[in-house]
Image (tube, helix red, strand yellow):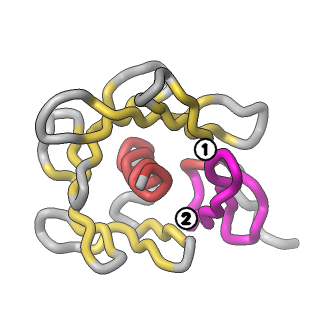
Amino acid sequence: MPPQTEMGLLEQRVLVVRRVSQGYELLNESGQPVGHARWRQLGWWRWILHVYEQEQSPLVCSVRTRLGWPPRREIRDAEGELVGFLTRQLLLNRWECVAFRFHAGRFLSEAGVVLATWSNQRLEFAEGVRHDPFAKMLLVAAVVAH
């Protein structure tokens, strides 16, 4: 009997991220859809990106531009609670401390430990974040919002 796969977006070990006309399709390692992300315009210059689970499309998180300096994007969970921020090279937690640095296709901790890799449309989570939904929200937001 084949092993049962977990179907939730944030329960995946690997996500394949494919660009589609309005956003992204999120697939598990076997190529089955587990979620999607869509851009929505809020005004003539503001946009929001919603990330959804595949099954019945519940919201997982959203990404929107935050006004101010330095420019950054704000990541919130489905209940609207702040998860963190996305800058060019950094992912910050809700307290604005560095959670991940992005360098050469790798998301690194402050200690230099590889916590996820991003290559050829494939986001792979290391053991250190595999069971942390908030860290995964930050990482998914980073790859679909850039």
Q: Is residue 28 magenta?
A: yes
Instruction: Assess whether residue 72 is covered by the magenta stretch.
Output: no
At a point 73% along the width and 60% down the height, the residue shown is 5
Q: Is residue 17 placed above or below 22 in the rendered structure?
A: below
Read off the residue under disc 1.
37
Magenta-drawn stretch, dominant element (helix, strand or loop):
strand
Which secondary structure lies at badge 2?
Answer: loop
Find the magenta span and give its range.
Answer: 11-36
> From the viewer's perspective, is 130 left or right of 110?
right
Residue extending furthest toward the front: 44
Residue type highlighted by circle 2: Arg
Mark closer to the observer (2, 1): 1
From the viewer's perspective, tell me whether residue 15 is left or right of residue 104. Answer: right
Return the mark for residue 10: none
Q: Residue at x 40, y 73 (%)?
A: 117
Name which residue lies at 41% across and 30% down. Answer: 45
Quarter of the figure that contains the C terminus:
bottom left
Q: Nearer the viewer, residue 78 or 146?
A: 146
Reading the image, the residue beneath label 2 is 13
Vertical position of residue 103 compared to residue 109: above or below = below
